[in-house]
Amino acid sequence: MSSPAFEELAGRIAELGRQAHLRGWVLGTSGNFSAVVSREPLRLAITASGADKGRLGPSQVLEIDGEGRAVGGGGRPSAETSLHLAVVRARGAGAVLHTHSPWSTLLSDAHAGAGGLAIEGYEMLKGLDGVATHRHREWLPIVENTQDWAAAAPGVETLLKERPEAHGLLIRRHGMYTWGRDFAEAVRHLEVLEFLLEVVGRSGEKEGTWPR
């Protein structure tokens, strides 16, 4: 029987999926969202593989353990489950959100040669945890896409430990990951970063504009 904590998070994840779909961030079955149900033992609520985010319901959210195995709910875990777990371990995140928006997809390719995308000078940066000025320089690492995240996740975990100041990362020609200490903070980071990516994209900033 599912715990009340899981049931609450499943409802919040389903609502986020529908809202993110309306904003064009997770069209079709793209994207996946997770939230920590418990730490000891580690349990996550995560969207099932292949779920249409525009019609996402709580029944399409399942519960997994720290090894990525389903322990409750219907469906099978996302192919990127290991990446969610890597972010939780590296950052102590309470929620991990992944979108496939047009701007995150385009910019992740345009700036891949630099290894990441830097964003600075925008007031909206102050919506990120710990940022108090528009002069902040946010660096979003870019990693190559793969169909084997179980093998690639340890490298991403190491990267996030080396870049503790980052609030998100981009996967080349794929999309963005962000996270937060809890679900509300993760959603705020998602909205802030998607806004900033669109602004950068629409402004026409090119690869190499920002110093590393």
Image (spheres, helix red, strand yellow):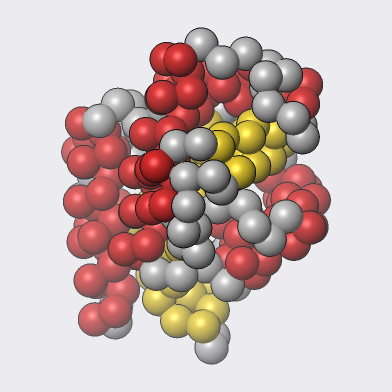
> Quarter of the image containing the C terminus?
top right
Query: Which quadrant does the N terminus fall into?
Result: bottom left
Residue 110, quarter of picture: top right
199 relative to 9, above or below: above
User: Residue at the spot x=55%, y=52% of the render?
Assistant: 167
- Residue at image position (56%, 48%) is 136
Q: In this view, does 189 lie above or below 171?
A: below
User: Is 18 left, or right, of 106 in this rendering?
Assistant: left
Question: Which x, y percent locates residue 10?
Answer: 27, 63
Residue at 38% over, 53% down: 127
Residue 145's spot in the image, x, y percent?
68, 31
Is 115 on the left-hand or right-hand side of 98?
A: right
Name which quarter of the figure residue 113 lies in.
top right
- Please state the horizontal and vertical placement of residue 123, each as a whole percent of the image: 39, 42
Q: Can residue 1 be seen in this view?
A: no
Q: Which residue is drawn at 74% across and 30% down?
A: 211
- Percent x, y of residue 61: 33, 57
Seen from the viewer's position, the closer of residues 23 and 166 is 166
Considering depth in this image, is 130 or 97 the residue closer to the camera? Answer: 130
Frontmost residue, 74 versus 112: 112
Q: State whether residue 67 is above or below residue 54.
A: below
Residue 104 shows in this picture? yes
**Residue lying furthest bottom in this view?**
40
